[in-house]
Structure formats: structure tokens, C-alpha cells
Amino acid sequence: MGSITLKQVAKRFGDTEVIPPLDLSIEDGEFVVFVGPSGCGKSTLLRLIAGLEDVSDGVIEIDGKNATDLPPAKRGLAMVFQSYALYPHMSVRKNIAFPLKMAGMDQAAIDAKVNGAAATLNLGDYIDRRPGQLSGGQRQRVAIGRAIVREPSAFLFDEPLSNLDAALRGNMRLEISELHQTLATTMVYVTHDQVEAMTMADKIVVLRAGHIEQVGSPLDLYREPANLFVAGFIGSPAMNIIAGPAAEAYGAPTIGVRPEHMELSHDEGTWRGVVGVSEHLGSDTFLRVDVEGVGTLTARAGGEFPARHGDTVGLTPDPERMHRFDANGLRIAG
Amino acid sequence: MSTTHSRTAGKAMISPAVILLFLWMIVPLAMTLYFSFQFYNLLDPVKSFAGFANYEYFLTDPAFFEALGNTLIIVIGVLCITVIGGTLLALLLDQPMFGQGIVRLLFIAPFFVMPTVSALVWKNMFMNPTNGLFAFLSKLVGSTPIDWLGHHPLASIVMIVSWQWLPFATLILLTAMQSLDSEQIEAAEMDGASALSRFFHIIVPHLARAGTVVILIQTIFLLSIFAEILVTTAGGPGYASTNIPYLVYMQSLLQFDVGGGSAGGIVAVILANIVAIFLMRLVGKNLDL
């Protein structure tokens, strides 16, 4: 139940190839996140799986059966949209009941399922209100409720949290992760936010211009990014990419050092530079350091590290946790 | 702009416009009301007080009830045709197709044709029992041509007026349809709704507000249909296609009875208000007023 396989799936709009042929397999029960900058084709890929767009080439298999030409409703998938796409003229109850009503289920069974979903998602207080009277987070929950009552073999999420404020986004992120633990259903989640990808995913698919750059668990991607793009995209703050003589000293045309993998001191260091901006977050301090001949580097220090604009500090990278890339931007193993 | 002083100044500034508009409305109404209580015939120079005689005469005239019925048939008939037809046409025009801009322009064109002109075109080029297009089509299949304006005068009027107002309904409903979030349709598609249930459960409720606007605006204009009747059937045969405005016209300008016509005018105003209240109760809740 709930495995999805893409074989040489491609999508073209006219002459523009949005997604060149790609292969991907999503295992049953996995939480897969498609992540990439805007316009990278991640939403299109999700819509291809959902059946809202026709594939130009290739085969989509759901549960081992060819679903390439099946209409969306027959694929057994449920989708949560970025705009939530609730039906504004129906109450929350009717919104959630809509897919069941369309499936021709009898009223008693519908009521039981809607009440079940309402209990799972704590919708009880506003079950008879209209979407227009709800806050963003409540609408999000209703949209998820509408998806779970269908008991789909997989959930598709299209940037579901991008319209919420930061605090609520953090909460909903947890709730969706918990929902995944409870239901143990396959979830495919599209986002441009690498924090969401890192925190929620079992498996991250990094996309750029329709190409899959790398597939792996969050920590795999963090520890061994396959190329410069993934290296720069995964991790917050972003990895420092250094080219030129400073990199050649470590035996590669380009090296990458994460802010958290550099030793900071006031007296000495491989690279010495002047602090531009220091961000004190309490638990951490992020310093933007201008190093002559290397560039501007971001470094992470402990929360109590005393540094102000204009101070000179020394940075020492940890060669063990340094990433080396060749002239084509691909990772050099070892 | 919210101090007492500025608000007083604001009221003083807009008062000329408001007073002008008020006079514009109240003077003709007051004069009509005054005339409706007078024996006032243009052929007879002597005016005298009539009491309710004009009203009694107008309301007990058998033609009044026929005209009232005809008015309602025209309003309801045209509303049904334009709202249902307009929704279907809007659905059609909303589809991506070749030459969309031109096709939309063609659909809207009838609205820009003057009522007298379009009624004459229908009368002479389509409905004429010897030379009309419909007659030609009837003969083509070997049946007897129908004398539309002679035998089905009211239906013909409804047809002509519908043709004129269909573009208006289509245009308003089309813009409403285009404002529907495509993700809602996609969500319904994912939820397993067929094309028909998507139409009835998602599109129709979305169109409710625009549809209300169409119904309210059209009702105002359809209650006072006049030119189309004047140039096609002249209210006949008998009173078969006479509506209230046309009856008022006949009373005051064909029979020169200004008093009776004014009484009819006041009756028409009262009827229009009854219809308006009824409509606002029925569909006005969609407007969130």
C-alpha cells in the first residue's frame, strides 16, 4: 500500500522541457520531501503524481500498478494544496465529508468518519463554521482532515505551510510529522524550505531545473552532498563555498566548510578576518567574517562568544569535515 | 477626515449634488402622483379632481391583468433563459480555444445593438412568415412557416429580449467563473467529483453572487421593456403582448388620457417595488449586504 515508482517520467509544456526524464521510487510509508528553489519543477512533479497534469513520457506506478493514464480520483491519493482549496460555501463538516459523499458512501458512515477526523485534528470547536471564518492554521487542519478521511494510499502536500506565520509553521510541521507516525502512510511533501525538508523527511529529493540532484536521508545530504548545489542548499546557515588558492591548499579546486565546522578564536586561525555582522541568537552566535583572499565566511560560535563589528577573529576549518569538490562541482570522495 | 468640523463641511459640500438628485427623482414622481388624481385628457382642456377614479378605471380594466401577466412572463422567461443559457455559454467560453478573444467579442456584440434595431432585425429578417430565415428553414424541411409575431407574440418578444440580454449575463458569469481558484476544481477532482458534480457543487455556488447581480439588474430593465414591443407587435394582437409600461403608454399617448396613464405609472412603480422586495428577500442574501 502506497509505493510510488516513476520510470523515465518527463513533462514538456510545448517545446519547453520542464522535467527531463527521471526515475524515482518512493517506498510504502516513507515521508519523502521534494525540495529545491522555486521554478525547479517540484510542484509539477507532484502534480504529475497526482494526475492533475498529464505526463509527456514515461510511466507512473502506484502500488505496482500502472497509473499513468488513471484520472486523479482513481489513484487513491489525497492532496493538500498550498491555498488549502477549501470549498468556501460549505461548512467544515461538509468540506471534510465531500470526498466521501462523492464516493457514494451512506450518511451514517460519513458522519462516523468525519467525526473521527475531527477528533484526530481537534476540529470540534469549529466544525460547523465556514472556511472564511477560520484562521490560516485552522484551514490547514481542515484541508488535512479532508485528505485523511479518504484513507488514501499516499498523501501529497504542495507547500502546505508557506502561507502560515513562523510560529504556526513550526507547530504544523510537528503535527504533520506526528500524523505520519500515527497513520504510517506514504507522504510526499513539496517545499522550498530546507528546514522543513531536514526536519520532516525520511528521504529528501533535491531538484534543480527538473533534474534530481541527489536523493538521500537528511543526514546523508548533510554529511555527503553530491555536488555544490546540494551543498549550498542543505544546511542553515548555508555552507561556505571557497575557491581559489585557499581551497587549493586543501587539495581541491573548490571546498565547502559548514559554519558549524570551524574553530573560532580571537588570537589565531588558518584564516584571519574582520567581523562584519554578528547575530546573537542566545544559543548560537553567527558571525559574518571578511577574510582577505577567501571571501566572506559565515561562522557559528557558542552563544556567549564575545565578538562585535570590527573585531579581528581567526577561523580554523576542521579538515575532517571539509567537503572537496572538483572543477565540475562534483564531490571528491574521501 | 473625521473631526466634527470636517464632517459638517463634507455634508455641506455634497449637498448640492444630493439635492439635485433628490429633485430629479421627486419632482416627476410628485407630478405623476398629482396627475393620477386628476381627470386630465389632452383632448379636453378642463382638468378636475378625480379622486381614485383613474386608479379604479386602470385596475379594473381587463387589459391590466393581461398586461400584468405578460410583464411577469417576460421578466421570468427572459431571466430563466439568460441565467441558464448564460451559465452554459460562460462555461463554454471559459474553455481554452482558438480565437478566444474574437469569439468572446462576437458573443457580447448583441448587447451593443439598440433595442429598436435588434427588434426590427428579428421581425423582418428572422420572423417574417414569408421572407424570414425561420420561414425559410421551415420550408426547407417541408413544414408550414410559423407566423411568429402573429401567433406567438409573447414568446417572440421573450426570444428577442433574451437574445439581447444573454451577452450581459454571459459576461458577468464568465468573469465570475474566471475568478474561481483553479486549485478548488483540482481539489474536487482529487476528491472524486465528476464533471457534473464539480459543476453543481463548486462552480454553481461560486456563481451565486454574480448570478444575483445579474438577476437584480436584469429585473429592473425587463420590467420596463418597451421598444421591442412597440416596433414588433405594438402590444397585439389584442393585448396579447402588452405589458404594463406599454399599457401606460397606450393610455396616456394613444388615448391622450394623462390622468389614467399617471395612475398606471404609479401602479407600475408600486409593482416594481413589490418585485424588488420579493427579489431582495429571495436572492439578496447572496450579496452579504
Image (tube, coloured by chain):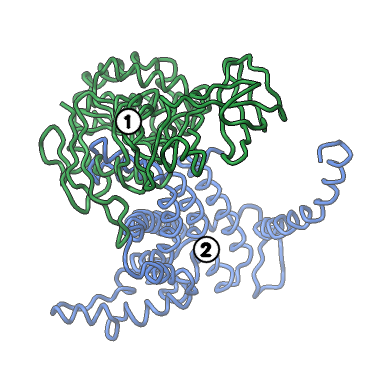
Chain A display color: green
- Residue bearing the label numbered 1: A334
Give the residue type at disc 2: Pro
For badge 1, the amino acid type reads Gly
Q: Chain of mark 1?
A: A
Of the pair A18 and A47, the residue shown nearer to us:
A18
- Choose between A73 and B194: the one closer to the eye: A73
Q: Quadrant where the C terminus of chain B lies?
A: top right
Query: Which quarter of the figure has residue A64?
Result: top left
> What residue is pinned by disc 2?
B245
Does B75 sit above or below residue A152?
below
Helix, strand or loop at mark 2: helix
Residue closest to the eye, A271 or B169: A271
Residue A88 in sight here: no
How many neighbours does mark 1 have within 10 angstroms: few (below 14), some (14-19), or many (20 or more)? few
The chain whose colour is blue is B
* Residue at 30% across, 40% down: A46
Is label 1 or label 2 in front? Answer: 1
Q: Where is residue B198 drawn, in percent x and y?
A: 29, 43
